[in-house]
Image (cartoon, rainbow, N blue to C red):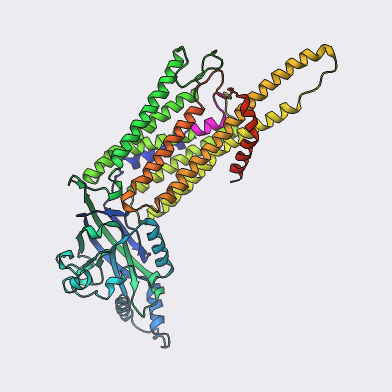
Amino acid sequence: MTTTTPLLLLSLFLLLSTTNATKHSFVTKHDARYYIGPIGSPYGFLKSGVYNLTVFDFDLTLTKKGHHHHRLAEDEDEDSESDSDSEEKETKEEEEEEEHSLKGLEVGFILRKFTSESEYARFQTTIEDNPSICSFELYREHDGITPKDIAAEILGDDDKYNSKEEDTTFAAEDGVYLSMNDQSVTWKPHTPSSAHVFSVQEEGLYFLLYQVCPTEGTDTKILHSVRSSFELDLNYHNYDKYGSVSYLTAGEMPLPTMFLYFSISYALCLGLWAGNIRSIVIGGTNGGAMSRERDGAGQPVVYPIHHMMTILLGLKTASVFFESARYHYIRLSGHAELWSVVYYTFAFIKGTFLFTVILLIGSGWSFVKPFLNHREKKVIFLVLVLQVIDNVAVVILSNGMVGERLYEDWSAVLHLVDILCCCAVLIPIVWQVNNLEESMETRGGSGGNGEGDDEEEEHTRENNNASSENARMLSKLKMFRSFYLLVVCYIYFTRIVVYLFASVLDYHHIWLRYFVTELGTLAFYAVVGLQFRPMVENPYLEVKKDEDEDDMSFEGSFEMANKA
C-alpha cells in the first residue's frame, strides 16, 4: 500500500503534464475497422462556422488473408497454379491482385449531419449490422467526376460549393464528403484536404465518419482484411453572438459562464459551512447558524468528518472554477494545456475525497464510532485504488480522441471502474444499517418483567432508559436509511438519468447535460450537509416522537431500494 499508491499517483501526474484540453489530430495505423466513427467529438456548427480537414499519409492495404479470400471468390472453379512458379511471378501477381481488389472498394471521409446523438447511435448500429450500407451513398454515383461538374446537380446552387486545388470534396446540406478513391491525388505522399463554410440551412450537429465501402458485386467479407492508415488534422470553429471566433461547439458556448456561476454557488455553501464550523469551535453562543440545539441546552459537537467535508467543499469549488477557466481558454484558442493540468489535478483529488467522505459517513466513523473495522478499511482502500485507475483513464482519454482504438478501450475501463466505485460506497452503509437493526432487535428482546413491588421503581427506571436508548438507535437507523436512499438516488441520477437526458438533446442545448449534472450534485452536497451538520451531543440523537410512526413506511422504502 505504501509503495503502490505513490507510483500510481506519479504516473497520473506525468500524464497530466501532457494533457491537452482539445486535440486536433487523429492518427491510426493498420486499422482493421472498415468503419470509424465518430472521429472526434460531435460538433455543432452555426452560421458561418468553418470546417477544415487535412489527410496525411493515407494508405489502404489488404492482408494476405484478404488476397487469398479474393482469389477464391474470383477463381473458385479454376485449378491452382503449379508450385514451381517463380517467387518473382507470385509477388507480381499479388501486387496486381491487391490493386485489383482495392478497385472493388470505395473509401472516403464524410462530415454527416444528425439531429441528435441517439439518431447517430441508431445509424451506427445499422452500418455495423450491414456493411454493404455506405454512409456516403449519396455521393457515390458522382465519384470520379470533378465537383464543379456536379455542384449544381447536388446543391442546386453553385454558391454553396467550396472547392480547393485538386479537390475531391462534395458538399450538400446533410454533409461534406472527401473521396479517397483516386490514389494519384489522395494517397500518400499527397495531402488531400476539405474545407467548408456553413450556411444557415446547414446548421446542425455533425459527426465525422470514415468508411470503406464495397462496390456492387464485391463480397463484404473482404472488408475484414482491409487495413487503413492515415493521420488527420482537424480545425472546427464557430462565431459567437459578438462575432468573435469560438472553438467550442454550438451547445458548449454557455459552459464557461455556467461553471463560473456554479463555482460561486459552491463558494457560498463553503462559506456558510466553514463559518458554522468556526463559530462552534470558538464557542459561539448559539452554536452556529446551521446547528440546532436540543431544548436550548448543550453545545453542538464538531467531529473530524466535518473538517473533511469542509475540505471536500473547497476542492469542489476549485475544480468547478478551473473547469470554467479551462472552457474559457478553449473557446478563445482551442487549447488550454495549463488550465487542463490544474483542472484534472483538482478533479482527481476531489473525486477521491468525495468517495472517501461518503464511505466514512456510511460506516459511521467519527461521530458514531471512533474507529473502522478491518473490512471497512479494505473497502476504503479498494475504492481509493479504483479512483486512481478511474482518474488515470480520464487523463488518457483527454490525451486521446474519440474514435481511436486506445480511446475506446480506456472508455470501457472508465465506465467499469466508475460502476464498481458506486457499488462499493453502498456496502458500508448497508453494513451499518444491518448492525443498527440487529442492535435494536437485541435491545428489544433483552427486557424482562419485575418479580416484586420493591423492584418496580427500578424496573421502571430501566425501562425508561431502554426506551430512550431505543429512540436514539431508531434515529440513527432512520438517518442511515435516508443516507442510503440519497446516495442511490445521486448515483442513479448522475450515471443514468443524465445520460438518457443528454441522448435526446439537440446541438443547441448540449450544455443542459452539464447543468443538470451540476445541479444534482449541488443538491446532493446541500442535503448531506444538512443531514450531518454539527448538532448537540451526537448528530444522530435528535429524536422526534412523531417520527416513530413513520418507521414502517421508511423501512419498506429502504427494502425496495435494497432489492433494486
Question: Is residue 358 shown in magenta?
Answer: yes
Question: Is residue 30 shown in magenta?
Answer: no
The percent position of residue 351, horizontal first and vertical second, equals 43, 37
Query: Residue 367 lies in what quarter of the image?
Result: top right
State whether residue 146 appears in this view. yes
Q: Is residue 17 left or right of residue 8?
A: left
The percent position of residue 200, horizontal first and vertical second, equals 22, 57
The range drawn in magenta is 357-367
Q: Is residue 77 left or right of residue 187?
A: right
The percent position of residue 350, horizontal first and vertical second, equals 41, 34
The percent position of residue 240, horizontal first and vertical second, equals 21, 47
Q: Is residue 474 above or below residue 143?
A: above
- Residue at the right extreme, as displayed: 452
Q: Is residue 532 left or right of residue 398?
A: right
Q: What residue is shown at x 27% (from left), y 63% (from top)?
A: 175
State whether residue 7 appears in this view. no
The count of marks equals: 0
Q: Is residue 134 above or below residue 325?
A: below
Asked whether 129 or 198 is in front, the reply is: 198
Q: Is residue 149 left or right of residue 38?
A: left
Q: What residue is shown at x 40% (from left), y 24% (from top)?
A: 272
Q: Is residue 120 above or below residue 526?
A: below
Asked whether 226 or 505 is in front, the reply is: 505
Asked whether 12 or 538 is in front, the reply is: 538
Magenta stretch prevailing secondary structure: helix
Asked whether 170 or 81 is in front, the reply is: 170
Query: Residue 79 lies in what quarter of the image?
Result: bottom left
